[in-house]
Image: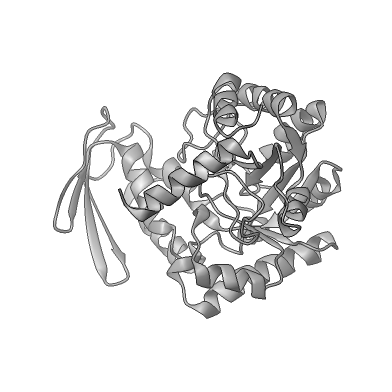
Amino acid sequence: MSESLITRGLRRVRARLAPGGVILNYHRIADPVDDPTGCAVSPMHFQQHLDVIATLGVPATLDHLVDAVVGGHRPERQVVVTIDDGYRCGLTVAVPIMQSYAVPATFFVPVEPLRSGGGFYWDRLFSLLAHDEPLPQSLELRFGTETLEWRVAPHSPEVAPNAETGGLIEILDRRRLSAELSARFHPLLPGERNELLEQVAEWSGREVDEKALPQTLDADELVALADSPLCTVGAHTVSHTMLSAHPASVVARELGEGRRILEEMLGQEVLNVAYPFGDYSAAVRDAAAGAGFRAGCTLVPEGVLGNADQLALPRFLVRDCDGESLARTLHWLGIG
């Protein structure tokens, strides 16, 4: 058994013997059907989750949990809700449910969708690819110095394994193609993404149906969200890129500008950040400290103990499941 597995096992045992807190990570609160990321949680299940949180744990703000960590105390039984990406359903669907249970949440919002008014690239790719209309059978894209070609089914059959030989990738399911392209877009910056999106759109012969995309917050809605007593707004970089893929100058700009622009829009301090995709490194963590953030959230699936690094806090990614499933997870972590 590797040292990392031993260390993780010891952390879990300690979490059971001395329960701390838990940070939960949501994205869209919407019907998970046709969700390209697999991260949407239905409103019914989100309501069940908040009922479980209010019953088994101590609903807390992220700031309250960080206060405990900074003071060297275990955030005992504290459960923190965070919602990433700034989708409009956070304001229109999640907040009313939160109000019913008096459960607060921190919303981590990237700047680019606020400024452009457009949807995320993964939703655009899904719109261009995940349909039953005919498509050309070969897609070729260049990522930096690497050129990749995908063999695409003319229609969208059942999911089948990918077969990769050299630069040719045969994908018999378009949803899988959408997911794979999205993953390759993750480390890119907006200019590169937009150029590739235009190539995919031209290849597909389709236009993105803007009205059908999951909508993101606009500036006025962001202010309305921040004005809710149960809501705190945190930063999520400018462009939602994988920070560890970039040089220090880009990381500093993504973190610093992501914070500065939100503060200008809201007229208040933004002290917390979530690293997109949970992707971070020691250099990214230090850059977040340099940008003035008090807390940073990852996607390491562990509980939060009193000795946690406040700029590398673990979070559990929550996918669509019923309240009983979430309750079992919280029990396993010693909550409830």
Viewer-side residue, 58 vs 195? 58
Q: Name the spot of residue 143 as percent of width and height, x first.
A: 32, 65
Q: Is residue 320 visible?
A: yes
Residue at point 38%, 37% (across, down)? 130
Viewer-side residue, 110 vs 294? 294
Q: Name the spot of residue 49 as percent of width and height, x first.
A: 65, 26
| In the displayed structure image, the side of residue 286 where residue 280 appears, left or right | left
Image quarter where the C terminus lies is top right
Up/down of 221 relative to 335, above or below: below
Q: Residue furthest bottom?
A: 249
| In the displayed structure image, the side of residue 97 where residue 298 appears, left or right | left
Up/down of 317 relative to 52, above or below: below
Residue at point 68%, 24% (across, down)? 52
Viewer-side residue, 100 vs 287? 287
Q: Name the spot of residue 331 as percent of width and height, x first.
A: 59, 27
| In the displayed structure image, the side of residue 77 where residue 172 appears, left or right | left
Q: Is residue 207 visible?
A: no
Up/down of 319 relative to 115, above or below: above
Residue at point 52%, 49% (across, down)? 299
Total numbered labels placed on residues in the image: 0
Up/down of 171 relative to 326, above or below: below
Scheme by which the image is coloured = one colour
